[in-house]
Image: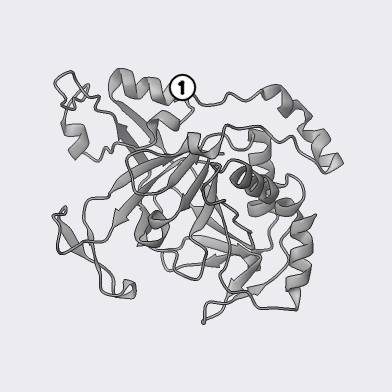
Amino acid sequence: MPIPIHDDSTDANFADGIAAGTSSVREFPPLEHFRVQNIPPAAYYIPDFITKEEEEYLLRKVVDESPQPKWKKVGTGRRLQYWGGTMSKNGILLPEPLPDFLTSFPDIIYRIESFLKTGSVKGKEKMELGIVQVLVNEYLPGQGISPHEDGPAFQPLVATLSLGSHTVLDLHHYLNPTKPSPPMISHSEDQGGKTIAAIPLAHLLLMPRSLLVLRSSLYTSHLHSIAAKEEDLIVHRPITLSGNASLNGDEGDVNGGGVEIANMDLLGDAEIVDSLKNTGRWKGRRDTRVSLTFRKAEKVLKGGALGAMANALKR
């Protein structure tokens, strides 16, 4: 599947864009072009959604210039922060104005909204996200997150921008007691005592500057996680003429921690794709990764900062 090649000459104007408060919006094929095949509906992987310069700018704003009290630590030591407000215990967003680096230059929110809306297939449901909150997660090498749902407090359509480093996102499904399934493990109690398959349903390699869009049942009835690793081994087993999958190298690589990814044809990274096709493997060490997840709360507290936030989104 062809992936659009961006004209890097536009990146030279990045400094001018900061001064003018504008950035060059790159054109992409329709959203359906980026659908990840052979997994439940639906995931879309868009490589190089932003430029390297925009990535550096966002990392500086989020990591270097964010007030330290904005960062919160979870039990594993991983840091996160919320922009646009926090959720109450009753699942209601207590809104706050979003910062200019998300609503103005480099107008990431507008670009995501526009891409989803204009890229939707005619005659089908329009993808209008209506972003009101941005969740920032920081992952140091060796840090991950266990299988989880983001919960019913948010619309089942989210977009995640990856900055700084790659990672592998694992997709999981709950066990159906009436149908055959891979080996199972007990699920944590906070997920209602359900059980999930021990073997992930699929793996997605998320590269820096890529955008991942999840929607429909892949959001509402599946889980996602990131394994706590410092290095990832990706393997590729091409289908032979006999219809069987073969690995160029030792089959033991699969048992040694290697995983096949569902979005290989969408990566847009010729070096990685060539390595997978020619050698059957690609290995990459993780660096610090920051993810920005754009989402819409189903319930938002009216009044107060809501008006200011709405005005910021309209700019």
Q: Is disc 1 placed on a helix, strand or loop?
A: helix
Q: Is residue 144 visible?
A: no
Q: As drawn, is 80 to the left or to the right of 9?
A: left
**In the picture, residue 48 is in which quadrant?**
top right
Q: Residues within 10 Å of mark 1 (few under 14, many from 20)?
A: few
Image coordinates of residue 254 in percent, x first then y, are: 21, 36
Q: Is residue 67 visible?
A: yes
Using the image, determine if residue 22 lies above or below residue 153. above
Using the image, determine if residue 29 lies above or below residue 87. above
Q: In this figure, which residue is indicated by the disc labeled 1?
A: 270
For badge 1, the amino acid type reads Ala
Image coordinates of residue 274 in percent, x first then y, are: 39, 20
**In the picture, residue 257 is in which quadrant?**
top left
Q: Quadrant location of the N terminus?
A: top left
Image coordinates of residue 271 in percent, x first then y, are: 44, 22
Along the line of sight, the residue nearer the viewer: 158 or 188: 158
Q: As drawn, is 103 to the left or to the right of 129?
A: right
Q: Residue at x 40, y 29 (%)?
A: 265
| Residue furthest to the front | 123
In this rendering, the count of numbered labels is 1
Image coordinates of residue 301 in percent, x first then y, are: 65, 78
Along the line of sight, the residue nearer the viewer: 222 or 261: 222
Q: Residue at x 71, y 36 (%)?
A: 25
Q: Residue at x 52, y 61 (%)?
A: 79
**In the picture, residue 235 is in which quadrant?**
top left
Along the line of sight, the residue nearer the viewer: 175 or 185: 175
Using the image, determine if residue 305 lies above or below residue 125. below
Q: Quadrant location of the C terminus?
A: bottom right
Q: As drawn, is 311 to the left or to the right of 200?
A: right
